[in-house]
Image (tube, grey):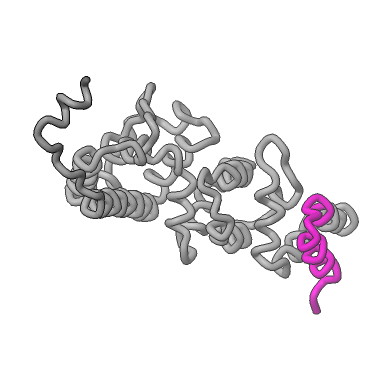
Amino acid sequence: MTHPVVLKTSQLILAGDIKGAETALTAIADSDGDEALVTVLNEVPPKDLLAIMRSFDGSKQTVVNMLVTPEQFARAVVLETRYRDQTHAALHGMMNAVLYRDIDMTAEYLEAIGESDGGYQVLADYFAERDDELLDFAISGQFSEEFDWDGGHAARSISWLNEKIGEIDEALHEGNSITGSRPKVSRADIGDHDWMETAWVLRYDLPDIFEQIVITLRDRLQQRVESLEESEDTAPVRPAAAPGDDEESAL
């Protein structure tokens, strides 16, 4: 039998009252204990659980974020693409809030996401504004102290993108250069409870998942190249200027 608070939570979310939905769930923990809330969260539809969690981050925690299990979190977070958030800012903040509430469980949460359908895409989206740096880390094993973002891939030329794809392919095909190399920096040295630490954990604790994220980002670069090439092919050709046009326009 479905717990009454589950229906109430869905109704509040549908009405746009995310805070009210979170409060209703928190009341379960207050009255019956944390384990009772964890049990109830199993009944909450993943889309509703996501709606609550993405409204909070490390600076504004919620009991739900503090108690959600890796499996519950993974089922919810893979639905993030439905929000069509181009910056993925809410995803980034929500994930950091959960991943680093207990650093001993960071890898467990990441593994649960990576093993879910659509998980690689979500993890790639998490690095949305750091994908250049992540790929450099994958290739070199080190993080750049100063990185020139310069507009990201949208501002890159076809030749630059193809060069980057070539570097990634070389690293992927060089035995275990990505997944089998030893750390050049320790987790403590880059322990920012943010994207760098997440990248480190993925590479050295979950190498198979990390490699799939790299492949996902590599494929996105390829899609960008194809999109640019298609734009060039369909761009209108300007007619050549007739003799004397330049002279006339200068008068």
Q: Residue furthest left?
A: 243
* Residue toward you, 160 or 10: 160
* Residue toward you, 245 or 62: 245
Q: Is residue 207 visible?
A: no
Q: Is residue 17 magenta?
A: yes
Asked if 81 appears above or below 97 in the picture, the reply is below
Asked if 2 appears above or below 69 in the picture, the reply is below
Tell me where residue 58 appears, x and y as whole percent. 66, 38
Q: Residue furthest bottom?
A: 1
Q: Which residues are magenta?
A: 1-22
Q: Residue at x 45, y 35 (%)?
A: 196
In the rendered view of the protein, which quadrant contains the C terminus? top left
Tell me where residue 44 appears, x and y as whole percent. 72, 66
Q: Is residue 28 magenta?
A: no
* Horizontal arrangement in the rendering, residue 246 relative to residue 189 (left or right): left
Q: Number of marks in the image?
A: 0
Tell me where residue 224 appears, x and y as whole percent. 31, 49
* Horizontal arrangement in the rendering, residue 185 relative to residue 23 (left or right): left
Q: Residue furthest right?
A: 31
* Horizontal arrangement in the rendering, residue 73 relative to residue 34 (left or right): left
* Horizontal arrangement in the rendering, residue 2 relative to residue 226 (left or right): right
Asked if 30 appears above or below 156 in the picture, the reply is below
* Residue toward you, 238 or 66: 238
Q: Residue at x 44, y 56 (%)?
A: 121
Q: Residue at x 34, y 40 (%)?
A: 153
In the rendered view of the protein, which quadrant contains the N terminus? bottom right
Magenta span: chief secondary structure: helix
* Residue toward you, 228 or 164: 228
Q: Is residue 10 visible?
A: yes
